[in-house]
């Protein structure tokens, strides 16, 4: 495992934003933000960041874990164990202090409790930590690549179940369970999100849930899945034909999506507007009369969350930078036909990008059977 995840730059980055968003201190409540900032991965906790201190407040179940995880961050974090976090916050804030709260996370009930108890002025702010999380360090990229590698291996093995030797009675649910199992056996903490296995007409729903539909030879099957390692989740989609015998129309439509996806990947580089990636994919599909069949955005950042900044769509306004890790995943969805989506995760570099997902593409993927990796 390479390098420590935590660095003082993380908390310095948060403090550097205090002035621009008009706060004196910041209350972190959103779990992935808490983990990124303090290392703490438990289910109950919050952190108070002032210009001088970082305090993690959690309960006694997490005392040992919180001490161990915060110790890896490279800057001092005080851990407070209590069943009464509000009192702890009251002690840590003062009258008139402008305390930033995470507007996209804090519930109304919790806001009201804090507002009644604290003399500080609660200031709803958005994306303070999320913006910093866009850029991945080498250690974060290493975890994402490791997770992607595990998913690649799982895909290779799942092809044995649904490819040339499709076993009779194989359901979407079975394939999803096998994929999740293979991902864990590969060494992952688990799948990075609910695995999608969408066969035949179900493929026309971009986020179909795996059910009891039995795969038939000739079905298109959309597999969208990833592995989670150290909190970081990979994301990849491959579309294959069950039984490994595609029709001419399936091959034509697949080629359109594959070319669109490659155009998107080819457009990725440092300094490129995010919207250009979306446009590159959309143009290819539109030229083939499939513009209306591409019904979602083109991609998203991955990291501690499976969908994080930046979001790549027609409405994107940001710029790509070195160190972002994003997906490129155009797809087409035709109700009487099914769906085709191809998704890779790539690291933005100076002159382009480096994919971290390496599974072969094609309705009948061809794996290199060398023993090396
Ligand atoms: Zn995906
Ligand atoms: Zn995705």
Image: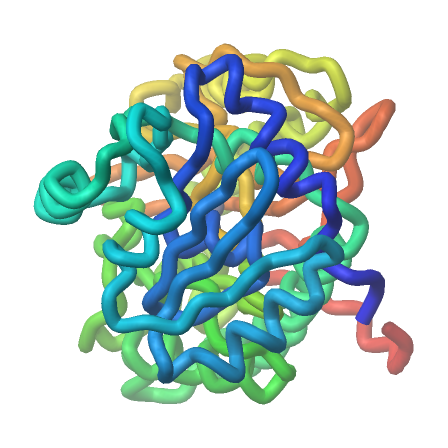
Residue 322 figure quarter: top right
Residue 295 figure quarter: top left
Residue 5 figure quarter: bottom right
Q: In the rendered view, tell whether residue 282 sits above or below residue 103.
A: above
Residue at 31% across / 60% down in the picture? 198
236 or 262: nearer the eye?
236
Image location of residue 224, percent across then percent down? 44, 58
Q: Looking at the image, what colour scheme do you see?
A: rainbow
Quadrant into which the C terminus falls: bottom right
Q: In the rendered view, tell whether residue 117 sits above or below residue 268.
A: below
Q: Is residue 68 left or right of residue 128?
A: right
Image location of residue 153, percent across then percent down? 66, 74
Image location of residue 159, percent across then percent down? 55, 74
Numbered marks: total: 0
Residue at 69% across / 43% down in the picture? 136
Q: Is residue 52 left or right of residue 43?
A: right
Image location of residue 94, percent across then percent down? 35, 35
Asked if residue 116 shows in the view, the reply is: yes
Residue at 29% across / 48% down in the picture? 90
111 or 115: nearer the eye?
115
Q: In the rendered view, tell whether residue 35 sits above or below residue 136.
A: below
Asked if residue 363 shows in the view, the reply is: no
156 or 48: nearer the eye?
48
Residue at 40% across / 73% down in the picture? 81
Q: Is residue 133 left or right of residue 323?
A: left
Q: In the rendered view, tell whether residue 245 sits above or below residue 68.
A: above
Quadrant into which the N terminus falls: bottom right
């Amino acid at each position: 495992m390479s390098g420590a995840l935590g660095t003082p730059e993380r908390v310095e980055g948060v403090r550097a934003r205090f002035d621009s968003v008009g706060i004196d201190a910041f209350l972190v409540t959103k779990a992935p933000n808490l983990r990124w900032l303090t290392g703490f991965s438990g289910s109950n906790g919050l952190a108070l960041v002032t210009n001088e201190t970082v305090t993690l407040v959690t309960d006694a179940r997490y005392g040992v874990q919180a001490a161990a995880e915060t110790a890896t961050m490279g800057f001092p974090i005080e851990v407070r164990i209590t069943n009464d976090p509000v009192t702890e916050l009251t002690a840590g804030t003062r009258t008139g202090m402008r305390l930033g709260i995470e507007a996209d996370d804090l519930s109304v009930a919790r806001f009201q409790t804090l507002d009644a108890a604290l003399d500080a002025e609660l200031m709803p702010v958005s994306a303070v930590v999320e913006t910093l999380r866009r850029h991945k360090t080498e250690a974060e990229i290493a975890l994402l690549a490791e997770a992607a590698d595990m998913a690649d291996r799982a895909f290779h093995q799942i092809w044995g179940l649904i490819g040339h030797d499709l076993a009779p009675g194989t359901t979407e649910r079975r394939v999803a369970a096998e994929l999740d199992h293979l991902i864990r056996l590969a060494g992952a903490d688990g799948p990075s999100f609910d695995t999608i296995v969408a066969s035949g007409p179900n493929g026309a729903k971009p986020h179909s849930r795996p059910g009891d539909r039995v795969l038939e030879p000739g079905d298109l099957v959309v597999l969208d899945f990833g592995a989670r390692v150290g909190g970081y989740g990979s994301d990849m989609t491959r579309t294959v034909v069950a039984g490994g015998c595609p029709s001419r129309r399936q091959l034509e439509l697949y080629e359109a999506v594959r070319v669109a996806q490659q155009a998107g990947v080819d457009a990725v580089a440092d300094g490129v507007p995010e919207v250009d990636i979306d446009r590159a994919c959309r143009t290819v599909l539109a030229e083939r009369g499939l513009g209306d069949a591409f019904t979602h955005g083109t991609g998203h950042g991955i990291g501690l969350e499976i969908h994080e900044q930046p979001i790549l769509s027609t409405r994107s306004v940001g710029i790509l930078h070195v160190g972002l890790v994003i997906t490129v995943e155009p797809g087409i969805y035709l109700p009487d036909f099914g769906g085709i989506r191809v998704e890779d995760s790539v690291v933005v570099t100076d002159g382009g990008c480096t994919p971290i997902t390496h599974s072969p593409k094609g309705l009948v993927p061809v794996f290199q059977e060398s023993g090396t990796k």
